[in-house]
Amino acid sequence: MDLDTGKAALPDACADVVACCRDDRAFGETRGPVVRELVRLAKPGGWVLITTPNQLSLLSLITLVIKKRFSAFQDIHYPAHLTALLEIDLNRIAAEAGLTEISILYSLEGRLVLTSRHYPQFLPRLFPRAFSDNILLAGRKLDD
């Protein structure tokens, strides 16, 4: 769907799973209009999945201190990521949009700070928030 309009040319409750892998400025606006549209598309009992960069990763936090921007929000990444959202933001937006069984999962893969190399796999497994570059929000639409 075109996230700029926030509307998909699809009927209500047409999908078992709805996924969003890119954000826009409307994504994080009050009450999350994009998330509400994703929920509209999901069937009762269906899942809404949202991926976004992990702003609380070690890489992102160090980049914020050094460059004054989160890692995935450098000029080189524009316009792929426009709205830096934290886990708490995603949880709040999902709950306000009517999702239940909300959980945050981690990619379990992350880059070493100031390199293109990745952390050894045991680190993200032990400390997923600190060493995962991306997060996934999963939430279920209530049955009607």
Image (spheres, rainbow, N blue to C red):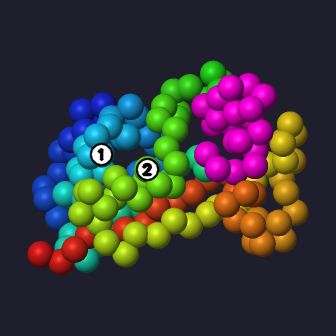
Crowding around mark 1 (Cα neighbors within 10 Å: few <14, some 14 to 19, many 20+) is many
Image quarter of the C terminus: bottom left
For the residue pair 2 and 61, the one nearer the viewer reads as 61
Name the residue: 25% across, 39% down: 6
Q: Which residue is mark 2?
A: 89
**Residues in magenta, as a range:** 55-73
Q: Is residue 74 above or below residue 142?
A: above
Percent of width and height locating residue 91: 41, 59
Could you tell me residue 47's position as x and y percent? 34, 69
The residue nearer to you, when weighing 109 against 56, is: 56
Q: Secondary structure at mark 2?
A: helix
Which quadrant of the structure image shows residue 125?
bottom right
What residue did someone put label 1 on?
32
Q: Nearer the viewer, mark 2 or mark 1?
A: 2
- Name which quarter of the figure residue 64 lies in: top right
Q: Is residue 83 magenta?
A: no
User: How far across and how far down the image is residue 57, in percent?
Assistant: 69, 51
Give how far apart the Cα atoms at labels 2 and 1 are.
10 Å
Res. 96 visible in picture: yes
- Residue that appears at 83% across and 53% down: 118
Q: Is residue 58 magenta?
A: yes
The answer to whether residue 94 is left or right of residue 21 is left
Numbered marks: total: 2
Q: Magenta region's main secondary structure? A: helix
Quick one: quadrant of the N terminus? top left
Residue 18 visible in the picture: no
Residue type at tag 2: Asp
Q: Amino acid at mark 1?
A: Gly
The answer to which image quadrant residue 99 occupies is bottom left
52 left or right of 109? Answer: left
